[in-house]
Amino acid sequence: MKKINDKKLLAKYISKYKISECFSDFKMIKTELVQYEKGEFIYMEGNKIKDLLFFVDGRIEIYNLSRNGNGFTIAYCEPLGFLGDMEYLAEIPTPNNVEALTTVTCIAIPLKANKHILENDIKFYKFLSKTLVNKTLGLSQSICNEKVPSIEKLKSYLELIGKNHIIDTNLNEIAQSIGISYRQLMRHMNRLCEAGYLSKGEKKGVYIMK
């Protein structure tokens, strides 16, 4: 993670997503613009959070690991998103991993610097309530989606991670993310190629979405 010292870009994101409207007096809130590289953990399961994060650019995956080490994807997210609400309210370590699928930009609200202001901001707590309700509804939908065929999950995932219609993500990671074996993934990829949805790139393991 690195900090970006660009006040104009920070102001642009704040205006674009109307972030100031989540607080009673946003001028009192200390903020930072931060960036995570692809594959970097934004939050790690079991760790205490130091910042609340408005996720304003890029793509992320939220998942946890079972005892046997297999990953279970909870959600793939694009802006705007808010991270850390449950951990902040319940005062618990983060229960899930949050990983950057691309370069990700966030507006960070450092808890240490803003604690007393946030604790007395009723408007902010109303915002937290709304985000938790939306996440609960999203989780319910995710559970329902367990009945969706794995090849349809794969297509949705490829659409999410495909940059300029090019898929060059590690295939083992893709299989793990959607909860299928590598062998099953390859069967699906071949079916999608036969159907004209994908074509194989010149480089091994690279596919092109049509």
Image: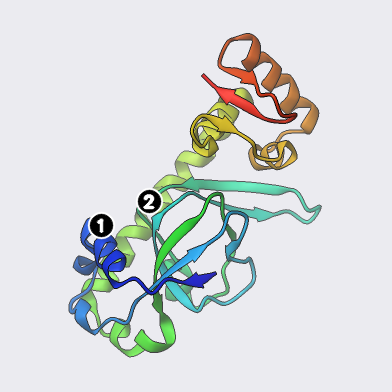
Q: Is residue 180 left or right of residue 62?
A: right
Residue at image location 56% in from the left, 59% down from the top: 37
The answer to which quarter of the image holds residue 31 is bottom left
Determine the secondary structure under disc 2: loop
Compare residues 130 and 101 and report the one nearer the observer: 101
Q: Position of residue 47 (x, y in %)?
A: 62, 74
Q: Amino acid at mark 1?
A: Tyr
Residue 116 falls in which quadrant of the image?
Answer: bottom left
| Residue at 45% in and 76% down | 51
**What residue does disc 1 label?**
17
Dot 1: element: loop
The residue to which callout 2 is attached is: 79
In this picture, is 109 found above or below 43? below
Disc 2 and disc 1: Cα gap in Å? Answer: 9 Å
On-image quarter of the N terminus: bottom right
Looking at the rendered structure, the kind of residue marked 2 is Pro
Horizontal side of 199 relative to 205 (left or right) equals: left
Residue count near mark 1 (Cα–Cα under 10 Å), binned few <14, some 14–19, many ≥20: few
Give neighbour class at mark 2: few <14, some 14-19, many 20+ (Cα, 10 Å): some
Tag 2 near tag 1, CB within 8 Å: yes
Residue 140 pos. (x, y %) = 46, 44
